[in-house]
Image (cartoon, rainbow, N blue to C red):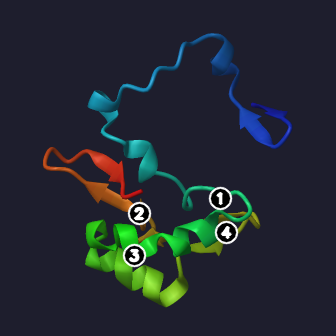
Amino acid sequence: MFQVKDTIVSPDLFDRMFVCDYATCQGICCVEGESGAPLEPGESDQLRKHLDAVRPMLSPEALAVIERQGVSYVDEDGDEVTSIVDGRDCVFTSYDEEGNCLCAF
């Protein structure tokens, strides 16, 4: 691993071609990890501003997390990230009929 500005990069980047194969992964990168999706300054304000537009697509569990702690939190690395449900799904995760993970936004 090496660092480019604020990003940690795997040396595999130079040996392997990455192509998102959504049909295979079904959006698993949206639910696996140690914290929520990283947010840029001001993005949490936008999430709060437009929350009512996506509220019908969110699970009851996600809505409970948002009610309890908000749409985001500061993780152990000091980064603002989206809130997560049960240590897994981003609160804005939704699923279609085939089980594909989608972002409510």
Q: Is residue 85 visible?
A: yes
Residue drawn where x is 68% and y is 28% of the image:
10
Q: Quadrant of the N terminus?
A: top right
Q: Residues within 10 Å of mark 4 (few under 14, many from 20)?
A: some
Residue drawn where x is 36% and y is 80% of the image:
63
Tell me which amino acid carries mark 1: Leu
* Residue corresponding to mark 3: 52
Judged by depth in the image, the label closer to the viewer, 4 or 3, is: 3
Task: Tell which residue pokes out farthest to the top in this image.
Answer: 15
Tell me which amino acid carries mark 4: Asp
* Residue corresponding to mark 4: 75
The percent position of residue 6, horizontal first and vertical second, equals 82, 43
Tell me which amino acid carries mark 3: Asp
Q: Are marks 1 and 2 in contact (CB under 8 Å)?
A: no
Q: Residues within 10 Å of mark 3 (few under 14, many from 20)?
A: few
- Disc marking residue 39: 1
Q: Residue 27's image quarter? A: top left
Judged by depth in the image, the label closer to the viewer, 3 or 2, is: 3
* Residue corresponding to mark 2: 92
